[in-house]
Image (tube, coloured by chain):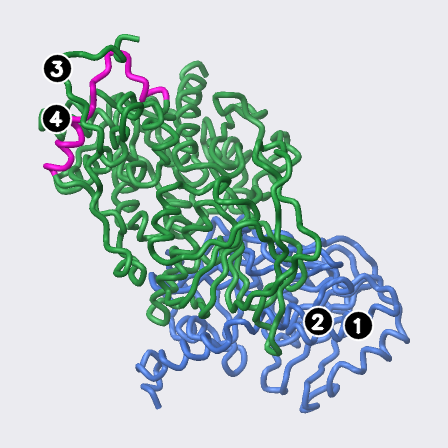
Chain colours: A blue, B green
Amino acid sequence: MYKILTNKELAPKIRLFEVYAPEVAEKTLPGQFIILIIGETGERIPLTIAGYDHKKGTIKFVFNEVGKTTKQLGLMKEGEYIETITGPLGNPSEIKNFGKVLCVGGGVMIAPMFLQVQALQKTGNKVTTVVGARIKDLLFFEDEMKVYSDKVYVATDDGSKGYKGLDFLKDLLFKEKFDRCVVMGPVVMMKAVSEMTKPFGIPTVVTLTPIMVDGMGMCGVCRVMVAGKMKFGCVDGPEFDGHAVDFDGLIKRQRLFLPEERLSSLLWEKLGGCSCGGK
Amino acid sequence: MAENKPKPKPKIQKESVPIPKQKPEERRRNFNEVALGYTEEQALAEANRCLQCPKPQCIQGCPVEIEIPAFIKLIREGKFEEAVKKVKEKNSLPAICGRVCPQEEQCQKFCIVGKVGDPVSIGRLERFLADWERSIDVKALRDAPATGKKVAIIGAGPAGLTAAADLARLGHKVVIFEALHLPGGVLVYGIPEFRLPKSIVRAEVDYIVKLGVELKLGYLIGRTFTIPELLKYKGFDAVFIGTGAGLPQFMGVPGENLGGIYSANEFLIRVNLMKSYAFPAYDTPIRIGKHVVVIGGGNVAMDSARSALRLGAEQVCIVYRRSRDELPARKEEIENAEEEGIICKFLAAPTRFIGDEKGWVKAMECICMELGPPDESGRRRPVPVKGSEFVMDTDTVIVAIGRTPNPIIQSTTAGLEVTKWGTIVTDENGKTSLEGVYAGGDIVTGEATVISAMGAGKKAAKAIHEYLMKK
């Protein structure tokens, strides 16, 4: 049982949790994830770790309340317990002095990107950070990023804050030379950024979040083609070379259970599982 | 030999007492157990078929060396409690073994009665005893004082549970680290409810906990802790690795990533461990179409096919690249599957999968095979017949062609010797290249049976005990 210490709304439907999980926290490094189960009938969901404190024995993660499990999780109160948290899973990120690094974080993945930015800055890199979201209300951590970055750019899909879309990156890549690019966010965004960095030959690392069940190398649902070879997101990843990933294949596989996910969430709401009482 | 000489007294009853089963037309749509088990009268009748050979052959066929004639004799005498004890001296998981061991390849293969008729149904008798015992209050067999030594067992599957039970009975403090959220390993994520009810696994695990074993769930060793950390900082004197078979294998043919194509592991984990058959009451979904194809011919393929049928598939077809004679699955399971209406297509293998506009599989192209000369495994090698491709409609494919070892422990344990296939190298007693580290089961042998994993757990427990007492 893992106690929830913090449940904080960062933006509409985006929540940050801090949970007491000392044995997980002890080993966590940037880039790793957990599998979480809220209760007996629950599913196993993977969440990228967005922070850890070895001394306090805590980990942080940020999620979007989109499906039944994340909506249920969002309703849990500080002091309540999550049944199982397994981790840290997946391979840690490669963190060393690369020189100048471009970090692009989008949506909820801005949160784990903050962990990367801190780690990269502390190992001597010059970090340029981009935070992106659909609309300005969904942005967060902009100020926190500024503390660890040389420069922070903001972008939104609708242009409600900062640049409209990510096309400005093309100009940035022409103007400045980067030694590495790290991208965490929606697959379409990771695909777009990887396509932009490719002509410049900038090594680009993307964090994949495919569907997982066990998350530790058993089921193979997280399979993804990388440079024509089948890889498993959970044990071979979650980070891969953005120039070699078959993003289109990944997008299709991420949508495999959308109808069931929608049904599950809808039924839960209609049966009054959420606070709105079926309204 | 003495037991072959006709004796005046025992008349050999050539036919075994059949085990009651759910009727095929009923069971094909439910997840309840297929075989219902012997009644007391049936068990007594079957036990009476045993010749009580002075030199019993059956024991040599048992990987954990249960004293078979002795427990059967106790059944005859109606001493069920003592009979269970006799079994449990060697096997802490009898309700499981009685159900899933391939007895026809083991103890029963050597049974003398089997030379003139059906062998004695040793497995069914073992199951009878274990089921009988669950109806009374189970006492844990602890027979040694505490040694003060501490052993970490990695994986709560058949190998780990067996090693844990034996080591606890020898007086050691045992902690099992299980990566999943429920104990049992393949017994809960792999073998379906209708062949091995989860309540039975739960009861056997409870028994092991009664022996004093501590169970830690949701710990992935290699990540949460590594083996060197367990030995150096967490106070363990020895480690047993029983992590089982891991990553699913795929065929490497085009279209394998289409929707509706599951590895058998994914399919069975969703259905068994996550209870997808009860979606949306349980949160993990599964989608089963009308025409299910299962690729492969082992027990995992049979389990997948029979599960798919129970989930509502109209037609389930097993596609196997060799012929019926080479099917690696247990004969009993093949018969059960066919009785339930599962079709087998032999001598064929997929060459590609064809998807619809939404990215889901809609058909599978296969090529016919013929059998060539035997390969390294001794089975005749399937050879594709040129130009024999054909297409079959399918909307769900389950790939059950085997698994490769999970790489996490091997990659996080410096100095642990592994084979080129990724399995862990051990001596005949399960000792690895690292001091105090032992391994057994599928992680050492590659995919095998529950009972062979238990046998390995047992051997390793003995070796660990000797190591600890010398240390």
CA distance separating discs 4 and 1: 76 Å
Please state the chain letter of the residue tagged with numbered disc 2 in the rendered image: A
Q: Are marks 3 and 4 on the same chain?
A: yes
Task: For mark 4, give the secondary structure.
Answer: helix
Q: Which mark is residue A195?
A: 1
Q: Quadrant of the C terminus of chain A?
A: bottom left
CA distance separating discs 4 and 2: 70 Å
Q: Residue furthest top?
A: B2
Question: Residue B373 or B111: which is nearer the viewer?
Answer: B373
Please state the chain letter of the residue tagged with numbered disc 4 in the rendered image: B
Residue B77 in view, yes or no: yes
Task: For mark 2, give the secondary structure.
Answer: helix
Please state the chain letter of the residue tagged with numbered disc 1 in the rendered image: A
Is B45 part of what is drawn in magenta?
A: yes
Residue marked by disc 4: B76
Task: Tell me which amino acid carries mark 4.
Answer: Arg
Q: Which mark is residue B14?
A: none
Q: Which mark is residue B9?
A: 3
Task: Tell me which amino acid carries mark 3.
Answer: Lys
Q: Quadrant of the N terminus of chain A?
A: bottom left
Residue marked by disc 2: A190
Q: In the image, what residue occupies the spot 55% across and 53% down? A: A89
Q: Earlier in the sequence, mark 2 or mark 1?
A: 2
Task: Tell me which amino acid carries mark 1.
Answer: Glu
Task: Please give left or right for residue B386 compared with residue B307 in the image.
Answer: right
Is B297 part of what is drawn in magenta?
A: no
